[in-house]
Structures are given as structure tokens and as C-alpha cells.
Image (cartoon, helix red, strand yellow):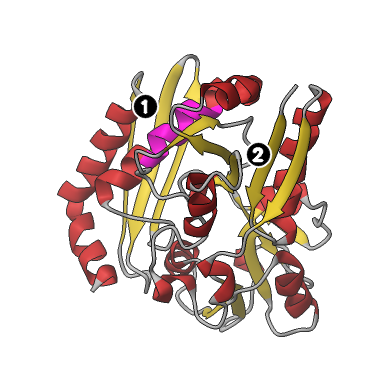
Amino acid sequence: MAHLRIGSRGSQLALWQANHIAGLLRERGHDVHIQIIHTTGDKITGVALAQVGAKGMFTKEIEEALAANHVDLAVHSLKDLPTELSGEFELAAIPRREDPRDAFCSVRYENIEQLPRHARVGTSSLRRHAQLKVLRPDLEIHALRGNIDTRLRKLEAGEYDAVILAAAGLHRLSKTELVRQIIPADTMCPAAGQGALAIEIRAGDAATAQHLAFLEDSAARATTTCERALLNKLGGGCQVPIGATAQVREGTLHLDAIVARPDGTKLLRESGNGQDPVRLGKAVGEALLESGADEILEEVYG
């Protein structure tokens, strides 16, 4: 059996994810060590993610450790990975996916509709911000960074009337006490790759790839490949107001996607069906561009 070194961010959720994969590998008889690596995104906490704008802010330093042979594999939240990997690396496995939807968390209110006028809502995501503004233009949306515990603590302290978080992270950490609603994907379109893990290795490392092959989930690979193909077509990362959610329905892929102005004054929605994940993602992305998504994204990038 192999000795495998996992590179991971140091947040509570990242370590849960790394330990989850480590546990599955240990069940197969492997000796596994987790190495914590601090990333740019972990160091810049005082501003909203959309204002930082650096692709790979949560993965760059981990990939550097992988390239330098300091670790053998990296466990990422897939939505943190840039849509185009360097030729040095490959995704050895995408395990079974958690719920990709967003969760509405609140002490007093059951859903977005119940929030009073001008309620304070916390989120670090421009995608969530934009869709909240579409639903409720009156809401006051505030940038909220920090780990899940920090965000929930601020909610309980009364700094916010609600916060929006990924359902997957809350489920994984068993922190669902304040979840009042899992927001339907047709109400708030999730981020591309949300709820999925990505196991990254050095390109051509056949031995490590073989050890990790059992982790692969075909449905998770197909849906996330489709979502990331759309994101790549639009030139976006995880800090832009783009949503994409794919499902396998009776052997066929279905993709829904949105692009929205951050102020909520315009939301474009397109969908499609197909067999090829990349072709479908590109086609729906092209439809969004033809509908005017390029103008919205130029404003955001500007």
C-alpha cells in the first residue's frame, strides 16, 4: 500500500473534506498524511471575494506544493478550481456530489420572502448577491467573509437577519440548526461545481491515479464538467454573477444557467439538453452571450 500526502487548506470545512478522503483511502490500507497549506484567499479576509478577483486564490499555493512534490494529491472544493487546469495537473477523481444548492440561514425568518423590508443579508458571493436583488430589490446585502462558524456566529449575534451559505458545507460539518430553507435551484441558481470535491494530482502520476480511481463518480464528473464548460465559455471564475446547475435525467444531461447584473436589474437564463457535457456547456454559454451576458460580464470585470 502507498504512503499518500494530501494538501489542503486549513479551514474547518477544507479539513473535513481532506479527512473524509483520507478516511476512504485508509480503509483501502493506505498510509495518509494531511499537510495544511495557507492560500492567498485565506490570507485576504477583509474584502469581498468579488473585489479580490484573483483566479485560483484558494488553490495556487496548494498546486505549487503539488508541483514541487511536497504533496501527492490535493483535495479542493471544485468551485474554487479555475476552469482550465495547468498542463502540470489533472483531476484524478470527482467523488459523489453533495447537494449543490444554497441554504437560507436565519434565527427568526423561514425564507427569503419572509424577510422584512431592508433586512440585512450576509453573503460573500456576487452570484448570490445578484439573485437576491432580483428576488428582493429592497434587501441590504453585505459582504460576509470568514469560515462557516464565524458567519453563523455573526448571524446569531444579530448582525444579520439572514446569511446564505452552500448547503453542502453545512451538511458536511453538521451545522444545519439555523438552516430554514434549501433554496430551489430555479430560485437561486448554484455556482458551477458547488457541492463537489476535486482530487487533483500531477499529470502522468499513474500510480496515484490508480489509488484514487475508486473515488470517481460518473454523474458528478458529467454534471460538473458541463457546468465548468459553461463557466469557461463565459470567461468566469467563482467570484462572478454566473450560476450553473446540471443534472442527469434519464441518461441525458440537462443544464440551467444564469448571468445577472449585481444590482439585480437584469437576469438572463438559458437551458439545454445533451449527451456531451462540454458541448452542452459551451452551447448554453453561447446562448447566454447572444442574450447579452457579455455586456453584464464586461461591466463586472471593469
How crowded pointer 1 is (Cα within 10 Å; few <14, some 14-19, many 20+) is rated as many
Q: Which mark is residue 277?
A: 1
Q: Quadrant of residue 208?
A: top right
Q: Nearer the viewer, residue 221 or 202?
A: 202
**Residue 246 spot, x, y in % from top left:** 46, 34
Is residue 251 in view?
A: yes
> Is 104 in front, or is 60?
60
Does 152 appear above or below 281? below
Does residue 80 appear in the picture of this structure?
Answer: no
Kindly identify which numbered label has been placed on residue 92. none
Task: Examine the residues drawn in magenta and state their main secondary structure.
Answer: helix
Question: Where does residue 174 sit, x and y in percent of width and height?
Answer: 82, 51
In the displayed image of the protein, which residue is found farthest to the left? 290
Q: Residues within 10 Å of mark 2 (few under 14, many from 20)?
A: some
Residue closest to the eye, 216 or 115: 216
141 is higher (above) or lower (below) than 6: below
In this picture, residue 96 sits left or right of residue 244: right
Q: Residue 224 lies in magenta, yes or no?
A: yes
Q: Position of residue 105 (x, y in %)?
A: 71, 64
Q: Secondary structure at mark 1?
A: helix
Asked whether residue 285 is drawn in magenta, I would say no
- Left or right, 169 with reference to 261: right
Query: How far separated are the C-alphas under marks 1 and 2?
Result: 19 Å
* Mark 2, residue position: 98
156 relative to 242, above or below: below
Amino acid type at circle 2 is Glu
Q: Between disc 1 and disc 2, whose residue precedes?
A: 2
Please state which amino acid type lies under the numbered disc 1: Pro
Extent of the magenta region: 220-228
Which residue corresponds to the image point at 49% horizontal and 33% vertical from the top-left?
Answer: 91
